[in-house]
Amino acid sequence: MDFRDKVAIVTGGASGIGLAVAKGWSARGGHAVVADFDAANGEKAAAAIIAAGGKASFLECDLRDFAQADALAARVDADFGRIDLLHNNAFAIWRGPNGHGLLGDVAQENWDHVLQIGLSSPFRLTRAVLPVMKRNGGGAIVNTSSVAALQAQAHVGPYSVAKAGLAHLTRMIAVEYARDGIRCNGVCPGVIDTPLIVGAPLDADFMAGIPLGRLGRPEEIADAVLFLASDRASYITGQLITVDGGLTL
């Protein structure tokens, strides 16, 4: 997988899966644009990649503001003249009270928050990069969905619905833009060892439901993303790859 002279936008790139993708992309010769609302960690992420000999830059972007999504794509186009990969990875689960529980108890503001970041913003950013990719003869879009998109899980309704919508958005983009040389695929991670799960109740019964018996590593999701972004996957589009240690089995 050779990404020399290629440019990737990775949203949610300051930590977890996004950071692993940015590191993997730059390790293979590409320039990783780390996009995140967390300026402190985003700057650290880009600096760490550069210190390791890679190419990276950080752009602060709050995807709750659709105008910032448009501006992000425009800035990368202006700086590099190309966007070879868009990795829609940023997401939200809930915030504040009444965000986690049965659907009838979820506050409207939490529903709106999760759907805006998890589904509407990937649509908005995808729409912004499509003209750049079309002008340059193609590109790859990889969306981070979730196993929650494949099976209904109680108490995380807004997140599950957003991820299911993102999964189908993946298919729609693949169908509509294949003739422009643009491929769109998705990954559906299981439970991954990221800062998000710190303090989560991962007891023995829960772990017994994962056939491989452990949490996934961010790098294992990144490997799937980078494969889908590469020329090795040149005949793959509109697909969702589940990387979950067998959890959905």
Image: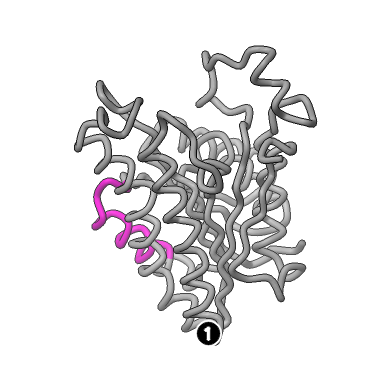
Task: Kindly indicate the quadrant of the structure image that contains residue 91.
Answer: top left
Residue under the image location 26 percent in, 24 percent down: 98
Circle count: 1
Q: How is the image coloured?
A: one colour
Residue under the image location 41 percent in, 33 percent down: 156
Which image quarter holds the N terminus?
A: bottom right
Towards the viewer: 152 or 29? 152
As drawn, the residue found furthest toward the left would be 108
Residue 209 as seen in the image, left or right of residue 121: right
As drawn, the residue found furthest toward the bottom would be 179
x and y percentages locating residue 70 in the rendered image = 30, 62
Three-letter residue code for mark 1: Asp
Which image quarter holds the C terminus?
A: top right
- Is residue 70 shown in magenta? yes
Q: Which stretch appears magenta?
A: 63-76
Towards the viewer: 151 or 65? 151
Residue under the image location 35 percent in, 25 percent down: 101
Towards the viewer: 170 or 79? 170
- Is residue 103 shown in magenta? no
x and y percentages locating residue 248 in the rendered image = 66, 40
As drawn, the residue found furthest toward the right would be 212
Predominant SS along the magenta part: helix
Residue 153 as seen in the image, left or right of residue 17: left
x and y percentages locating residue 241 in the rendered image = 66, 54
Q: Secondary structure at mark 1?
A: helix
x and y percentages locating residue 243 in the rendered image = 69, 44
Residue under the image location 62 percent in, 64 percent down: 239
Return the residue at label 1.
180
